[in-house]
Image: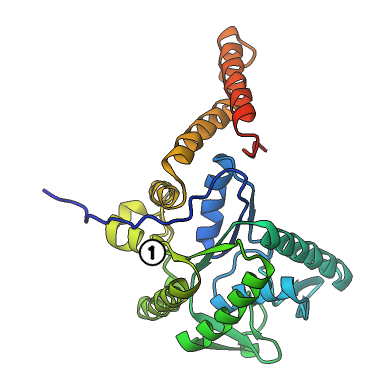
Amino acid sequence: MKLQLDFKIDTSTLNIKYGDEVVLLGSCFSDTMTSHFETSGFKVLSNPFGTLFHPLAVANVIDEAISPNKIGVVQRDDLYFSWLASGKLFARSEFELEKHLTTARNKLIKSLKKSRLLIVSFGSAWGYIERDFGIVANCHKMPHTQFDKKLSTVDLMALRWNEILTELKRLNPQLNVVFTVSPVRHFKDGLVENNRSKSRLIELTHQLSSRHGFYFPSYEIVIDQLRDYRFYKNDLVHPSDDAVAYVWESFSQFLFSEHTLSIVKKVKQIKMTLNHKSLYPGSKLDGIRIKAAKEQQQQLIKKIPDIFWE
């Protein structure tokens, strides 16, 4: 009995290697993949403006990093937020908020200038439009009457992203861009509405990747290949740890050469050993285990000094 569809993912020509820095922007997919990059020994910047779902919201933070323009300050009670960012960035004064946003902007532009890989994950084509600002990254619990909810067209999103990608190419000609669509269902929008949204994102990412980069099918892996609620968390919306690990395995094969993959496995094993909390810390066996892992780490540092161990 066959219980799973075969799904062969085309290999890319990226051949990402140690020393290549990585930027991840967008939906929860960016957040979940970040930890795997870090445990594999890569230097990563992930969502300095917080998790973003709409393609235009992601484009806005890149644009803001390249050409600082407006931050869209919004006050709620004694807290200050920005229409550009998620609720992760907040402050008790407008001055303090601007400091946080400047730090995020500087981190992003610095990484975009020197990274070899940008991974962009889109979550939803449903946008909330604040009448004075435009598409916002987050509504920050402001009154719903302040926003118009609208399903953005592929043409509108593609036009904006073609402009952004042209700017990125000028900024860093060595930057490769991988697009993907988050497999997380935006159930609160409604299942029919979520599918309308995802279909537009899939068309958008294929248009952009055909001209400017690569497409990785994280959406198709979870929705079509795994295709079972046992691969979801209890909310039946977010992929489980097993599903995320499965996607990472496919993603790493998409990004890395066989040689780099073999090093990734060694790095993850060493980090796992060094970070493991022993039942008997300070024991003879524990000391032997840690000493062996540190010796392996030093051997790899000599061979590949670009591995990021922090």
Q: Position of residue 4 (x, y in %)?
A: 21, 53
Please indicate, yes or no, whether residue 199 appears anywhere in the rendered image.
yes
Q: Position of residue 212 (x, y in %)?
A: 50, 72
In this view, 85 is above or below 24: below
In this view, 229 is above or below 293: below
In this view, 263 is above or below 293: below
User: Residue 300's quadrant in the figure?
Assistant: top right
In this view, 195 is above or below 41: below
**Viewer-side residue, 123 vs 209:** 209
| Image quarter in which the C terminus is found | top right
**Viewer-side residue, 37 vs 196:** 37
Residue sitting at x 41%, y 52% = 254
Looking at this view, name the residue that lies furthest to the left: 1
Q: Position of residue 106 (x, y in %)?
A: 78, 63
User: Residue 228's quadrant in the figure?
Assistant: bottom left
Total numbered labels: 1
**Viewer-side residue, 121 vs 73:** 121
Q: Is 143 left, or right, of 68 in this rendering?
A: left
Residue sitting at x 60%, y 29% = 303
Q: Position of residue 143 (x, y in %)?
A: 65, 84
Classify 10 Å Cα crowding around label 1: few (below 14), some (14-19), many (20 and above): some
Q: What residue would you read off at disc 1?
A: 219
